[in-house]
Amino acid sequence: MSDQQNEAECNALSRSEPSLPANWYYDPLHYAQEVKSIWQRTWLYVCHTDALAEPLTYRTLEIGDQSVVVLRSAEGELRAFHNSCRHRGSILCTERQGRLKSKLIVCPYHQWSYAVSDGHLARTSSFKEPEGFDKADYPLFPVAVTEWRGCIMINLDPAARWDMQQVFSYSPENLANYPLEDMVVGHTWRKVMNCNWKTFWENFNECLHCPNIHPELGKLVPLYTRRIMEPKDQPDWPQHQGSDDPKFRGGLAKGVETWSMDGSAQNHVIESLNDEDLSRGYSYGVSMPSVFIGAYADHVRIVRLLPIGPEQTELVAEWLFEKDTLNAADYDMSNVVDFAKLVMGQDSAASELNQRGMHAAPFKQGVLMPEEYEIKDMHDWIRAHLA
């Protein structure tokens, strides 16, 4: 194979590329435009279906200045509405999550009541409804909601159509053998990071930082110690074709089974996985801008991001397990949970350092190096949505 062919098949950028303007990471006006053009117009992850399994349970989500409530009806159907009363606009559900006392959503302000089943106005609190007033004219404003493989997704556009190929920027095909729908949430972790949402996503999309930021992860995934994410991230990749060394072929280090503190799956490997899944060691699905799914031999981790402001982002992680694994006396969930918290904490700290530094008055724009091709794709995606 010629050097020219090697370069053609290499993932790396062929030249340096300009990053996004620095003020896009902290300017309030630009942040407002991103919320409107990106976050309020794309499919967003809410939670795993296990977190809303019971009838009349709900979750609320703040997407910029828009509040949304996602519910499970008494009949088991998913519903999503703007969390706003049609009377004079009051918030309806005030908690992050909870369970309704009845099949009605009752406004805490004036007690207008709406049916969970379809959001229609069931009753007002006035002693008499005025002439010409029709309750049918005042249902809750609907929000599009769907469930994909146990993942609850919403779109503020009620007419939005679900298309997996469009929603996922990193194909979830590698997750096919994971029983996502039937897994249960064993642990949930919330963290507020002092960085722009893009800053964290950029960190996720490159491994130049891995050797010095994630030494523990490098012991499990030797390829990351080379500052790359895939074997073809460097032009010399053909020299290592056929190598059994995970430092060159990718995957987990020899003897390592999963992403955990000791690398062990504790004899609870997911039975539906095949040899290819286990050899790969880890699989991902990414839906910009709100979620990535990481799947491993014994568990799945779903990480949701939501912007709180120009320089604050909420991270919520859910760890999913098979029911038998979670209930097994010989399985310690903290082995994987603590490891992921360590890695995400390191990513968060690095992202916060990056965020602070971008305020330097002379710093107008960064530069992307060859290994940061995924960031280039992400930037193109953002520019397209803003256009």
Image: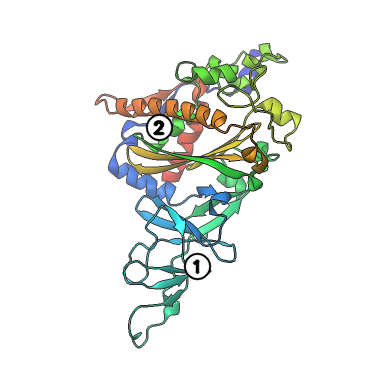
- Apparent side of residue 62 relative to residue 294 in the rendered image (left or right): left
The percent coordinates of residue 20 (x first, y second) are 39, 32
- Percent coordinates x, y for residue 353 in the rendering: 34, 25
Can residue 162 be seen here? no
Report whether residue 331 is seen.
yes
Q: Quadrant of residue 269?
A: top right
Which quadrant would residue 21 be assigned to in this image?
A: top left
Marks 1, 2: nearer the viewer: 1
Q: Mark 2: give few (<14), some (14-19) or many (20+) Cα within 10 Å.
A: many
The answer to which of 314 and 285 lies nearer the viewer is 314
What residue is rendered at 51% in x and 59% in y?
144
Q: Upstream in the sequence, badge 1 or badge 2?
A: 1
Q: Secondary structure at mark 1?
A: loop
| Residue type at the position of mark 2 | Thr
Mark 2 residue element: helix
Measuring from the top left, give residue 274's x and y in whole percent: 75, 33
Q: Work out which quarter of the rendered image holds the C terminus and state it.
A: top left
Q: How many marks?
A: 2
Residue 116's tag is: 1
Q: Is residue 161 above or below residue 317?
A: below
Residue farthest to the top, as pictured: 239
The alpha-carbon separation of the residues under discs 1 and 2 comes to 38 Å
Q: Report the residue that reaches farthest toward the front.
A: 329
The amino acid type found where label 1 is placed reads Val
Q: Which of the labelled discs sits on residue 126, or is there none? A: none
Q: Nearer the viewer, residue 117 or 357?
A: 117
Residue that badge 2 annotates: 199
Name the one closer to the observer, 338 or 179: 338
